[in-house]
Amino acid sequence: MKILKFTLATVFISSLIALSSCSEKYGCTDPNSSRFNSDADSDDGSCIYQGEVVFWFDTLTTDSLIKDNIYELSYYLDSTFVGSTSVTNAFPAKPECGTLGTVTVRKDLGYIPAIAYEYRVIANNDSIYWKGNVLVSGKTCTGIELDF
């Protein structure tokens, strides 16, 4: 009788372990989301996104702007002021988002993986020197080179 009880208990516990290891794990399955869950097997709609934009220019642009008596640039994303820089803050290649001397904008995208924004760069003489659209995507640092 003891052997039968032990066998039944072993089978029961083994079945529970087998069933629990087969259960589906829910969570965010998109690696570009800030809520990515590498253990999740099935997406549960909980993914949210953040992306960044960095504005930059090289020394040739700096030289051209200074020749035009431009010394400061102001940056706008969807008509919202997001920062300003001196035209002497030049970089030889795209800097990382958050680099000192750049204007970096972090956007919370909510449940949408990518959103397009309009940008404008206005010089100290109130002229728009650059404008366009930028696609901000989750877990991405998008660079906008301002070429003169």
Image (cartoon, rainbow, N blue to C red):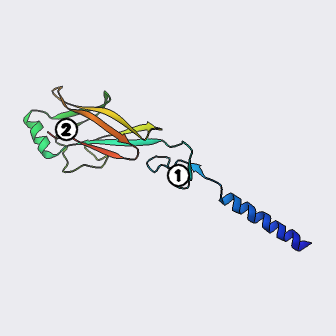
Q: Is residue 104 above or below residue 95?
A: above
Instruction: Tell me the CA gap for discs 1 and 2.
Output: 41 Å
Judge from the rendering whether residue 98 lies leftward or rightward of residue 89; answer left or right: right
Question: Dividing the picture into quarters, in which one does residue 64 lie?
Answer: top left
Identify the residue at horizontal 28%, vertical 33% (top origin): 119
Select label 1 or label 2 by which is in front: 1
Q: Is residue 132 above or below residue 22?
A: above
The residue carrying mark 1 is 37
Identify the residue at horizontal 87%, vertical 68% (top origin): 5
Estimate how packed mark 2 is, as few (under 14), some (14 to 19) or many (20 or more) residues with alpha carbons within 10 Å.
some
Give 75 or 20, whichever is nearer the viewer: 20
Residue 29: x percent and y percent? 51, 50
Identify the residue at horizontal 9%, vertical 33% (top origin): 68
Give 2 or 22, whichever is nearer the viewer: 22
Is label 2 in a helix, a strand or a loop?
strand
Judge from the rendering whether residue 37 lies leftward or rightward of residue 89; answer left or right: right
For the C terminus, give its image quadrant. top left
Residue 42: x percent and y percent? 57, 50
Q: Is residue 6 above or below residue 115?
A: below
Q: Is residue 81 above or below residue 22?
A: above
Residue 50: x percent and y percent? 42, 42
Residue 113: x percent and y percent? 43, 41
Amino acid type at circle 1 is: Asn
The residue carrying mark 2 is 86
Amino acid type at circle 2 is: Ser
